[in-house]
């Protein structure tokens, strides 16, 4: 299934994308696409629905973040060797973990707000992992059983903010720095999360190309590792790192500015488009 949220910001409704690409309204079935709707029991109920019997959503509504009421947005840094090299940082021996404020989360086409004092606003296409049940002290062999599904993510970053001091969070948490979507694809439909193509363009120029097969730490490893340090609840999201090609890695460096258009996609998970604007 492809689950999504549509409508004005703050009043999104739950929906699913049917086999013909039409949005079907799920308001009569679940209150939102959030933690409660992402439990194994709820997903089984949703998968048993006859999508053709659900109301069709007309027009071209705004797509909201594909998961609502996210409790934690956890990110993994430097998870592709080539990206660590282009960042002039050592290859990590264990996952590099940081948090992104949930207030940064926005819809797949809501746009990127370039902060007022921004110097180095950058892009990062990533695979997002959506947790489907409470996850604590799980082993790697069973870690994927706790995943409800996957989505696209853009870990927008302000490098000047990020590298001011020994922390990354403030350079990752500005408003609109967490686009996710356009929908969450359930784990059963995705299959192997270590075989997903990723790409990102800026103003029509290809900047990033990668595949999750080259991650240093697999999704299963990341979920298990995080669960040893913190519990995760349904609806929490993990952004799993980016392949090479970020703006900071070019010589000369290239960063986002007002009017730039970022498009990105992941195989089987859809595409996103964000227009940059000054705050």
Image (cartoon, helix red, strand yellow):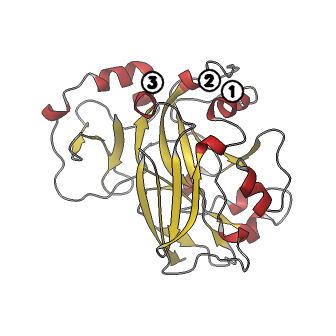
Q: Is residue 274 left or right of residue 71?
A: left
Give residue 188's position: percent from left, percent from top. 42, 27
For label 1, the residue is 224
* Rendered-image quadrant of the N terminus: top left
- Position of 58 relative to 86 (above/below): above
Residue 219 or residue 175, whichever sits in front? 219
The residue positioned 41% from the left and 62% from the top of the image is 109
Residue 219 or residue 106, whichever sits in front? 219
* Rendered-image quadrant of the C terminus: bottom right
Dot 1 or dot 2: first in sequence order is 2
For the residues bearing labels 1 and 2, Cβ distance under 8 angstroms:
yes
Give residue 258's position: percent from left, percent from top. 52, 81
Splitting the image into 4 quarters, where does residue 230 fall?
A: top right
Q: Is residue 204 left or right of residue 13?
A: right
Q: Is residue 127 visible in this depiction of the protein? A: yes
For label 2, the residue is 143
Give residue 119's position: percent from left, percent from top. 70, 78
Mark 1 against mark 3, which lies toward the viewer?
1
Dot 1 or dot 3: first in sequence order is 3
Q: CA distance from mark 1 to mark 2?
A: 6 Å
Q: CA distance from mark 2 to mark 3?
A: 15 Å
How packed is label 2: few (under 14 Cα within 10 Å), some, or many (20 or more)? many
Q: Is residue 73 visible in this depiction of the protein? A: no
Dot 2 or dot 3: first in sequence order is 3
How packed is label 1: few (under 14 Cα within 10 Å), some, or many (20 or more)? many
Label 1 sits on a secondary structure element that is helix
- Position of 19 relative to 173 (above/below): above
For label 3, the residue is 39
């Amino acid at each position: 299934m492809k689950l999504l949220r549509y409508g004005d910001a703050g009043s999104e409704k739950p929906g699913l994308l049917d086999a013909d690409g039409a949005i079907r309204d799920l308001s009569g079935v679940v209150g939102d696409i959030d933690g409660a709707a992402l439990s194994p029991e709820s997903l089984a109920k949703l998968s048993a629905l006859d999508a053709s019997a659900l109301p069709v959503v007309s027009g071209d509504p705004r797509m909201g973040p594909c998961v609502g009421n996210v409790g934690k947005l956890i990110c993994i840094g430097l998870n592709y060797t080539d990206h660590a090299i282009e960042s002039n940082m050592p290859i990590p021996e264990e996952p590099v973990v940081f948090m992104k404020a949930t207030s940064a989360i926005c819809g797949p086409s809501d746009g990127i707000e370039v902060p007022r004092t921004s110097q180095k606003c950058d892009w990062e296409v990533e695979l997002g992992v959506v947790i489907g049940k409470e996850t604590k002290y799980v082993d790697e062999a069973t870690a994927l059983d706790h995943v409800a599904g996957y989505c696209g993510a853009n870990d927008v970053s302000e490098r000047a903010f990020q590298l001011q001091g020994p922390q990354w969070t403030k350079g990752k948490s500005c408003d609109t720095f967490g686009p996710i979507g356009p929908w969450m694809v359930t784990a059963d439909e995705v299959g192997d999360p270590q075989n997903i193509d990723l790409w990102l363009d800026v103003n029509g120029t290809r900047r990033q190309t990668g595949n999750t097969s080259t991650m240093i730490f697999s999704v299963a490893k990341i979920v298990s590792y995080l669960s040893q340090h913190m519990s995760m609840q349904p609806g929490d999201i993990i952004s799993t790192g980016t392949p090479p090609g970020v703006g900071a890695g070019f010589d000369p460096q290239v960063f986002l500015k007002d009017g730039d258009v970022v498009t990105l996609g992941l195989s089987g998970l859809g595409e996103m488009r964000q227009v940059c604007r000054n705050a």
